[in-house]
Amino acid sequence: MPPFGSRTLAGLILIVLGLGLFALQLVTGLGDAIVLFIIGSLFIVGYLRWAKYGLLVPGSLILGVGLGRVGSIGGYATGDTEGIGLGAGFLGIYLIDTAYRGRTHWWPLVPGSIILLTGIARVSDDMQRLIGVIWPIGLIVVGLALLAGSLGFGRRIA
């Protein structure tokens, strides 16, 4: 638990974001990504220190956007690397919280998967066609799993 109240924490968050956004105006190239990595890392460290879920979400998303900036600025990849990074940021929320607390909320998987798949689909026309075929199959599989669970399949009988 932080030694200060939620208003103090909110004020510190706004100061860090403001300083980071100001720094983004002063740097170019991979400097953008470095600033985003620093800001995101500060949020993640705050989450790990005080276990405040509200710090994990912006931290992971900012780190994801920074990761996407590395790909787009550095010319390492084609397509929507920032979308891929943002999707990875959402998935990072789920993974970091699961690793840290042993349990988590499932909501980041939904936007993370959609944004990540959309970014991957923009890499090439072949990827777009492949994801266009796989996406409906994935929905069917998840739907069947939900139905099976609601009907009691897979439960142990005591």
Image (spheres, rainbow, N blue to C red):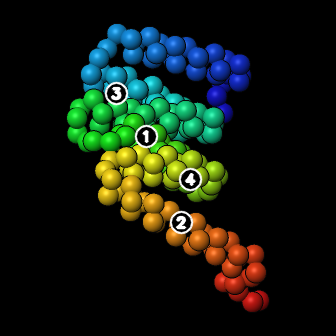
Query: Disc 4 designates what residue?
Result: 109
Cα distance in 3D space between marks 1 and 4:
15 Å
Which of the 4 quarters of the picture holds residue 98?
Answer: bottom right
The mark lying in front, picked from 1 and 3, is: 1
Q: Which residue is mark 2?
A: 136
Tell me the element at label 2: helix
Residue at the farthest bottom position: 157
Q: Is residue 49 visible?
A: no
Residue sitting at the far left: 75
Q: Residue at x 52, y 13 (%)?
A: 18
Spatial distance from mark 1 to mark 3, Cα to Cα? 14 Å
Q: Residue at x 74, y 82 (%)?
A: 152
Q: Are marks 3 and 4 in contact (CB under 8 Å)?
A: no
Q: Where is residue 156 drawn, in percent x and y?
A: 70, 86
**Rendered position, 67 above or below 129:** above
Residue 66 placement: quadrant = top left
Residue of label 3:
33
Q: Which residue is mark 1?
A: 83
What is the CA distance from the residue labelled 2 to the residue labelled 3?
34 Å
Q: Amino acid at mark 3?
A: Ala
